Amino acid sequence: MSAQSGPPYTRFVTHQLENWDRFVEESEIGDVTIDEYYLRHKPCKPTEEEHEKVMAELFADLVATGALVLPGACKVDDFQFTFRAAIDKDMQDGVQLTLKSEPELKPQWSLIPYYLAGAKMASMDTYVIKWLVLSIDTLLTTQKYNY
């Protein structure tokens, strides 16, 4: 059987999780926390800007390594992340993924729960990658301009 090309509900984005694993192993960064890798320090409590930076750089690396494959003319720079704090104790902090060209477009699946604080590069949950796949696919499906 061929490599996983994303969940069956995706229309635009595919993923190759083994590419992320290879990047982490070859770079020997498996035991480094995601925050520490992208922020160059280990914050006690990351700021909103730091959460956004981590997600943006993680996203760029996922695409650069081929772990996430964007469609045709679509580029990493077409997207932006905005931190959204949980509004009550039963909710999870998240990052809103939007298109820079249509920042007002915020479909239901484009708010990604933020579970990365303290996670190691090697144990970066496929959950985050699958949320990114779903979020990007939802944005591209609902946007005015198709890639």
Image (tube, helix red, strand yellow):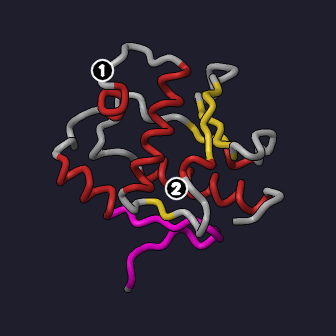
In the image, what residue occupies the spot 63% across and 55% down? 136
Residue 35 image position (x, y, % from top left):
36, 29
Q: In this view, does 78 lie above or below 83?
A: below
Residue 53 image position (x, y, % from top left):
48, 30
Secondary structure that dominates the magenta span? loop
Q: Which amino acid does label 2 sit on?
A: Lys
Residue stretch rendered in magenta on the structure: 2-18
Residue 41, disc = 1
Residue 130, disc = 2
Residue 24, disc = none
Q: Is mark 2 on a helix, strand or loop?
A: helix
Q: Is residue 81 above or below residue 125?
A: above
Which numbered disc flags the more N-terminal residue, 1 or 2?
1
Q: Is mark 1 on a helix, strand or loop?
A: loop
Q: Give the spatial CA distance, label 1 vs label 2.
A: 27 Å
Q: How crowded is mark 2: few (under 14 residues within 10 Å), some or many (20 or more)?
A: some
Residue 8 image position (x, y, % from top left):
59, 73
In the image, what residue occupies the spot 48% across and 73% down? 5
Question: Where, by quadrant of the figure, is residue 80 drawn?
Answer: top right
Q: Residues within 10 Å of mark 1 (few under 14, many from 20)?
A: few
Tell me: 55 left or right of 31.
Answer: right
In the image, what residue occupies the spot 55% across and 68% down? 7
